[in-house]
Amino acid sequence: MSLITVMPSGKSFEAAEGVTLLAAILAADENLSHNCEGKAACGTCHIFVHEGRKGLSKVAREENERLDAIVGVGSKSRLACQAKVLGTENIKVELLGFGSGV
């Protein structure tokens, strides 16, 4: 289990190993856009991971290609639908206040 902290709300909750950040965030009643049902096709679930990046699955080719097409992507960017919790460390994410997808 990992403790996920969501900014800017500051809400924290536990997430099981293997669950995507998108599923964990939605289960915690946080609002996060997701238009493609978790297929890395839209980029609307773009988030910043501020802490615990090593506690998430590696970026796969599909996610990397989608991130390349999104404005405002940086080294902390992930798609919540593709980032799976490894359960090895706590994670702090920032939900972006705008539709960050293309």
Image: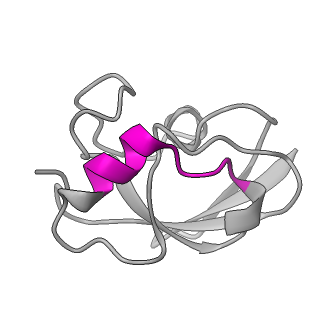
Q: In the displayed structure, does residue 82 sit left or right of residue 88?
A: left
Left or right for 26, reference 95: right
Give me the residue at 16% from left, 68% from top.
Answer: 71
Say which quadrant the N terminus sits in. Answer: top right
**Residue at 28 percent of width and 42 percent of height:** 33
Residue 5's quadrant in the figure? bottom right
Q: Is residue 65 magenta?
A: yes
**Would you say 35 lies left or right of 84 here?**
left
Q: Please tell me in which quadrant of the rendered image residue 34 appears.
A: top left
Q: Residue furthest front?
A: 61
| Whether residue 3 can be seen here | yes
- Asked if residue 91 can be seen in this view, the reply is no
Q: Residue 70 placed where, x, y %?
A: 19, 60
The residue positioned 72% from the left and 44% from the top of the image is: 85
Q: Residue furthest left?
A: 102
81 magenta-colored: no
Q: Is residue 99 above or below residue 42?
A: below
- Give 78 or 68, whichever is nearer the viewer: 68
Q: Nearer the viewer, residue 55 or 66?
A: 66
Query: How far from the left and from the top, in percent, is residue 72?
Result: 22, 74
At 38% from the left edge and 38% from the top edge, which residue is drawn?
Answer: 62
Tell me where residue 20 sits by quadrant. Answer: top right
Q: How many marks?
A: 0
Magenta part of the protein: which range?
Answer: 56-67
Q: Residue furthest top?
A: 37
